[in-house]
Amino acid sequence: MYSALRRMLFKMDPETAHEMTIKGLQLLQSTPPIRHLYQKSMTVVDPRLQTTCLGTTFPNPVGLAAGFDKHATVYPGLAALGFGFVEVGTLTPRPQSGNPKPRLFRLPEDQAVINRMGFNNHGVEQAKRAFETLTRPSIPIGINLGKNKDTPNEEAASDYQKGLEALYIHGDYFVINISSPNTVGLRDLQHATALKELLSAVIGKREQLGAEHGTTRSVLLKIAPDLTEEQVEEIVDAALQLGIDGIIATNTTLARDGLTANHRKETGGLSGKPLTSRSTAFIHHVYQLTQGRVPIIGVGGIFTGQDALDKIKAGANLVQVYTGMIYRGPSIAKWINQELLRLLEQEGFNSVKEAVGSAHR
């Protein structure tokens, strides 16, 4: 069924197709009886899939990455697709339109996507209104935060603090996104000195907000796959020293190795199948550095249960999909969870938690 729908969607401009999908999700979430029925049919319920980390419980380890629900307006509809958690954003303090169009490109031959969206979003205040209005789903909701493109890097911490303050009570965890390749200079914040200053300010703000609200929200750092091993070691060391609660590995890549599709030379971040093995190896390295001291969310080219399990065994506690959903369809979380359960049984694991980091043992 999705195969026919995908053929229709793939004939459209990618952003137009995305906007149509958003409208469909808005319709779904505005009709509670249908949403509940849909969620029941799409959700795989099994205690072996459950994970507790980041101060909350995830019913299954398959989440949706940031970038789909950019404005935090359709997360209740996305929750009905069977995901174990949904991450919204990237959200910036002020609304911004992002980079000029066209800025989103499918690479069907490579099962990949290139985007240079540029944090287009309606800003944290409108997201706050959405959180106050929409029905809260039962799964955890993460909030991905960025800086406005015209905010100098030396003032970036203020942008992340503003986002954290505005949305603190609405997120189950927060992500500091300094690894998108589509905001000029953003990745410079990954350099050790800049990173320490940024994280110190953000973690300090989190401590203040935690005291005010009587609850501590987890803060994670999302990093790029294009870093050298030395840079990764510096980043992880600094993040752990400053009290980061988790790491998301990885964002999109600037690499273009082995691509064959027409749009392969477009600038922007590449996601999808070409990132599968690269991000798994990256997670393996990060886990070696952290030794399980903080949770890892694995992202990059996850299409199947095997892709997810490879990342879990490499050290990921949770995984996220995005491009895989474009190619496999809205049932991807259901299929991956079903596949995961079969694979866990085949490999002798009693739960996802037991499989985490097993490649290192």
Image: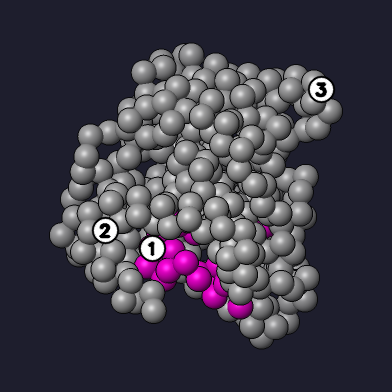
Q: CA distance from mark 1 to mark 2?
A: 9 Å
Disc 3: which residue:
211
Is residue 83 left or right of 191 when viewed as pictured?
right
Identify residue type, mark 3: Ala
Is residue 23 among the parts visible in the rendering? Answer: yes
Residue at x-position 66% and y-position 38%: 171
Residue situated furthest bottom in the rendering? 346
Residue 18, above or below 152: below
Disc 1: which residue:
326
**328 drawn magenta:** yes
Is disc 1 in contact with disc 2, using a CB cutoff of under 8 Å?
A: yes
Is residue 329 left or right of 165 when viewed as pictured?
left
> What kind of element bears circle 3?
helix
Q: Which residues are magenta?
A: 317-338
Q: Position of residue 199 (x, y in %)?
A: 61, 25
Q: Quadrant of residue 5?
A: bottom left
Q: CA distance from mark 3 to mark 1?
A: 41 Å
Residue 100, above or below 262: above
Identify residue type, mark 2: Arg
Q: Quadrant of residue 346?
A: bottom right
> What kind of element bears circle 2?
strand
Q: Quadrant of the N terminus?
A: bottom left
Is residue 258 among the parts visible in the rendering? Answer: no
Q: Position of residue 282 (x, y in %)?
A: 51, 53
Q: Position of residue 83 (x, y in %)?
A: 60, 61
Q: Residues within 10 Å of mark 3 (few under 14, many from 20)?
A: few
